[in-house]
Image: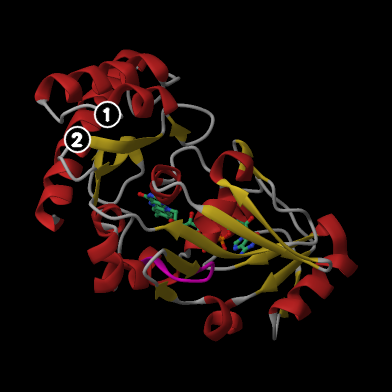
Amino acid sequence: MQVPAPFEYERATSVDHAIGLLERLGSSARLVAGGHSLLPMMKLRLANFEYLIDINDLHDELGYVEVGPDEIRIGALTRHRELLESDELAGAFPIFRDAEKVIADPVVRNWGTLGGSLCQADPSEDLSAVCTTLDARCVIRGRDGERVVSMTEFHRGPYETAVGDDEILTEIRFPVRERGGSAFEKVERRAGDWAVVSAGAAVWLDADGRIADARVGLAAVGPNTTGLPEISAALTGSEPSEELYDEAGQLAAQGCRPATDMRGSEAYKRHLAGELTKRALRRSVERARERG
Ligand SMILES: Cc1cc2nc3c(=O)[nH]c(=O)nc-3n(C[C@H](O)[C@H](O)[C@H](O)COP(=O)(O)OP(=O)(O)OC[C@H]3O[C@@H](n4cnc5c(N)ncnc54)[C@H](O)[C@@H]3O)c2cc1C
């Protein structure tokens, strides 16, 4: 039977209350959001905490998708299902709906949160690849106020983030630019499984239809979800073409750092990283053109 070690449990009534509890209880405490990553780890005794601070009552405060003209702000406690169902979000960033359709199953999507996904910092986390692709900024709050960090700063290594023991991730911000398109591609062994490899792409076109900027983020092929600046450099200023997508695919296959495991060999994952990057870029450009 898989049961966690005994722990004390408290429900936070506000973000400040949660921060106060974290300050008092230190590294023996952990926040629990959807619980779909933390609780399995505790049941397997891969993680043991004396206190769990449940933040689910803060959904009114931390569960939202706010779409503005220049920026989209998403609360950390926004659930997978809410991200999947938001038409406004899908309109601005279709990559979110692409990804959410292939993350886990309805039970996990009803509870799991964007903040929990990022804070878990699992190298296979699809939403981390989405946030890397979209150049997200993470808002971290502690007793002394807020700080805002990039995804590169946020993910320090596998299962390690910039969030301190007495801090909470409250919001994720995404810059909105005109003539943009985005897409997400994933290969999984069976429906709802973690990725063998997944790839996100976002492209912004200039008035002449050339690529003004492009970003690619990969999951499950390195110690963290991996942004690939060399692809951005290769694509920027060019006319979209199959040759260009091929070149980007080759850069993705060469630039990632997969390991052979039960999901596939290193060579197979490199092949997928290249192919999925090409497909995601192609679809992103089509979508950017559709939006004019
Ligand atoms: C069967 C199954 C299949 C899955 N398949 C996929 C998949 O295909 N793709 C995929 O990407 N994911 C998958 N997941 C993971 C799923 O997306 C989880 O919901 C997600 O990883 C964690 O979100 P959570 O809200 O449940 O976090 P929790 O488990 O509650 O927390 C995870 C960690 O984040 C911390 N945390 C949570 N919220 C905050 C916050 N606001 N501030 C600071 N720290 C915080 C917690 O303390 C904990 O350390 C799967 C999970 C399961 C159980």
| Bounds of the magenta segment | 75-80
Residue at horizontal 52 percent and vertical 42 percent from the top: 122
* Alpha-carbon span between mark 2 and mark 1: 6 Å
Apparent side of residue 36 relative to residue 9 in the rendered image (left or right): left
Q: Is residue 116 visible to the viewer in this orientation of the structure? A: yes
Q: Residue 254, percent across and down?
A: 36, 14
Quarter occupied by residue 165 = bottom right
Please, what secondary structure does the residue beneath circle 1 have?
loop
Q: Is residue 2 visible?
A: no
Q: Is residue 176 left or right of residue 59?
A: left
Tell me which amino acid carries mark 2.
Arg
Q: In the image shown, does 91 or 194 lie closer to the viewer?
A: 91
Q: Nearer the viewer, residue 179 or 124?
A: 179
Q: Residues within 10 Å of mark 1 (few under 14, many from 20)?
A: some
Q: Residue 131: x and y, percent? A: 44, 49
**Relative to 54, does residue 244 appear above or below in the rendering?**
above
In this image, 13 relative to 277: left or right?
A: right
Are dots 2 and 1 in contact, CB under 8 Å?
Answer: yes
Secondary structure, magenta segment, majority class: loop
> The N terminus is located in which quarter?
bottom right
- Residue at horizontal 62%, vertical 45%? 154
Q: Position of residue 101 (x, y in %)?
A: 24, 58
Q: As displayed, is residue 51 above or below residue 63?
A: above
Residue drawn at x 45%, y 43% is 132
Which residue does the numbered mark 2 point to in the structure image?
210
Q: Which residue is mark 1?
A: 237
Q: Is residue 79 magenta?
A: yes
Assess whether residue 76 is covered by the magenta stretch: yes
In the rendered view, would you say 198 is above or below 135?
Answer: above
* Disc 2 element: loop
Q: Hey, what amino acid is under mark 1? A: Gly
